[in-house]
Image: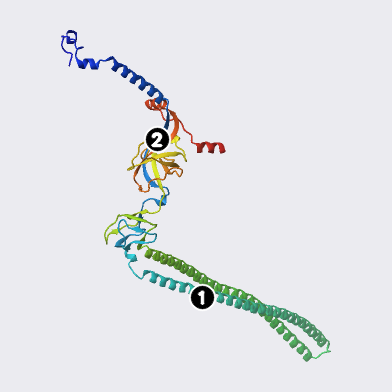
Amino acid sequence: MLNISNNRLNQKVDISGYKSVQRAFRVRHYRHFNRFLIGFALASLVILFLPWTQNVSGEGFLTTLKPDQRPQTIQSPIPGRIEKWFVQEGDFVKKGDTILHISEVKNEYFDPNLVARTGQQIKAKSMSVDSYGEKVKALNNQISALKNERSLKLEQAANKLIQARLKVKSDSIDLEAARTNITIAQRQYDRTSQLQEEGLKAVTDVEEKRLKLQETQAKLISQENKLLASKNEVINAQVEINRVRAEYVDKISKSQSDMYTAQSNRFDAEAQVTKLENEFTNYEIRNDLYYILAPQNGFINRALRAGVGETFKEGERLVGIMPSDYEMAVETFVKPIDLPLIHTGEKVRIQFDGWPAIIFSGWPNISYGTYGGKVVAIETFISENGKYRILLAPDLDDQPWPSDIRVGSGANTIALLEDVPIWFELWRQLNGFPPNYYQGKNTISKVEKK
């Protein structure tokens, strides 16, 4: 009843005579209620001093321990068109099994005999390389022959030069002899002329000596001409030597130029052969890429490019596959404020989605439905969600994880820290303080070793 009237009925009416009032206001009820309050207060006081395990909670999902065991997609390194599927979603495939067959979409690869024709081109270019090699050998032989011929020609010219010089010496001696003869003839003529003037010689004798003197003079002039001709022959022999050298330098240089040209053509042909061999290998590998194979044992999850005749670009995802052999792990995320409390090797409790669990985060020993994990990796850079990524592996000292859990399902994690009284934990939660800085045993041992 609302107390909105000035009439005080409780002062005018005596309600103590009613049974309901007598039962409600018994002294015995007050005594039991007071005992309950005292017991509850004592129990609450005792509970406040019970140990409470501090923890860092996180949310994540199931993944695999190794990167090559995680779900992946299969791409084609070349563009193509789907021709035939050999599997369907849910099939188990082994490594190397054919998943689908594709065909070519680029016009430069349409020729079905492209590999064979490229091999023929390689053979033709290889024969060209051999031909240039033989030409180089022939030119080397020609150069050797020219060098030998030059040596012989120079030796012949040198011999002619020696002969010319000897002839010059011989003509010089003959010239000196002619000069001596003319001196003698002049003396004889002078002596005969004098004797003829004295009457001791006849005029005929004088004329004979004059004729002889003139003959000697003619021989002297002839001998001088021979000497000059011999000197010209020496000069001609020297000119011949220079001409032979110049001629064979020109011939040898031309042969060497032809040889270098042949070598250049040979090297160019070898480069073309190497390029064709590279293309030949690429074509062979490309032919093998027309069949998309399974990279490892696993299950076909989903065909991302369906149908026959559908085209795609290189690098596009075609089909998803889940490896059949994998080691389970949990990928969870913690706040940056809690990251210093997490260390490699620490124990973590995990609750998987879909598995019944009764969790007391502060009393892990009485929790039910949680499984043990161990920290194996801590990301050193913050994730897009503003938290740090932690990777957990199964704890071999704890019970094994359920066999029916699947990669990608959710999981809640509880990292266990120090034991503190409940009153301290309540006080920390009310004030918004982080858990006590916790340094794991593994970290302490590492510091002591250092």
Residue 378 seen:
no
Identify the residue at horizontal 77%, vertical 83% (top origin). Answer: 181
Numbered tag placed on residue 366 in the rendering: 2
Left or right: 185 in relation to 401 = right
Numbered tag placed on residue 371 in the rendering: none
Whether residues under marks 1 and 2 lie with C-beta atoms below 8 angstroms apart, the answer is no
Residue 332 image offset from top left, x and y in percent: 39, 41
- Would you place residue 220 above or below residue 393 in this image? below
Which kind of residue does numbered mark 1 sit on? Glu
Q: Nearer the viewer, residue 2 or 139?
A: 2
Left or right: 66 in relation to 219 = left
Which class describes the residues within 10 Å of circle 2: few (<14), some (14-19), or many (20+)? few
Residue 57 seen:
yes
Disc 1 marks which residue? 134
Q: Nearer the viewer, residue 308 or 23?
A: 23
Q: Quadrant of residue 420?
A: top left
